[in-house]
Image: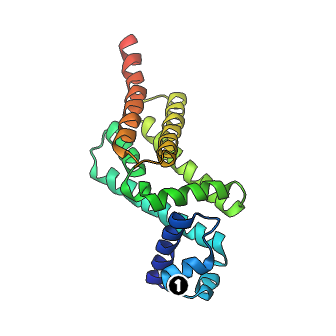
Amino acid sequence: MLPLRRKQLIQATLEVIDRVGLADATIALIAKQAGLSTGIISHYFGDKSGLLEATMRQILRDLREDTLRRRSESTADTATHLRAIVDANFNDSQVSGPVMKTWLAFWSSSMHQESLRRLQHVNDRRLHSNLCCQFLRELPLAQARHAARGLAAMIDGLWLRGSLSGAAFDAGAARQLAYEYLDQQLAKKIDAVAAA
């Protein structure tokens, strides 16, 4: 599929889900929003689930690229790398209304569709692995895994609470809470060294 058409369909999917929700986001509505025929969607994506999967793959690709960019621009210390991961998860590309509603639709659908469940599993593992890898630079393995699970849960929880609040998402407040948690986890190494 031509990249321009693919981008049109993904953007149309985001806009339609934002406007009417996933349940009412028909192929016909998405095609109309994109200015394309329903046949093109069926040909390239099969059905609405295939289009949702492609849309989420793009959102996840944007998240991964933003994370890598932020980490490459940051200093080498652990806290800065962890903050870059947090910042990417609360970036505008991840907390805009259409993207947030699509994330929610994806999470809900992933409980019932194997291909979406696999995609969600990959996303979860990637976040945990990235966080764990950074915490391992400062903490023993068990503590690093625990800190990574906690920070991943905090990122997802802050994101979910913010998306369901009905108000504009306060990414700054969410980042600050996540920073405080990661600083507390990294302070455990300092406490352990001081005690020794």
Position in image of residue 58 (x %, y %): 49, 67
The correct choice, above or below, for 76 with respect to 195 in the image is below
Circle 1 crowding by C-alpha within 10 Å: few under 14, some 14–19, many from 20:
few
In front of the other: 132 or 16 = 16
Q: Amino acid at mark 1?
A: Met
Position in image of residue 145 (x %, y %): 54, 34
Q: How many marks?
A: 1
Q: Secondary structure at mark 1?
A: loop
In front of the other: 43 or 33 = 33
Along the horizontal axis of the image, is 33 left or right of 192? right
Q: Residue at x 56, y 66 (%)?
A: 20
Along the horizontal axis of the image, is 13 left or right of 168? right
Residue that extends furthest to the top in the rendered view of this protein? 195
- Can you identify the residue that label 1 sits on? 1
Tell me the quadrant of the picture where the C terminus can be found: top left
The correct choice, above or below, for 40 with respect to 124 in the image is below
The correct choice, above or below, for 195 with respect to 49 in the image is above
Along the horizontal axis of the image, is 51 left or right of 66? right
Q: Does residue 81 show up? A: yes
Q: Residue at x 36, y 39 (%)?
A: 173
Q: Does residue 196 show up? A: no
Q: Residue at x 61, y 81 (%)?
A: 28
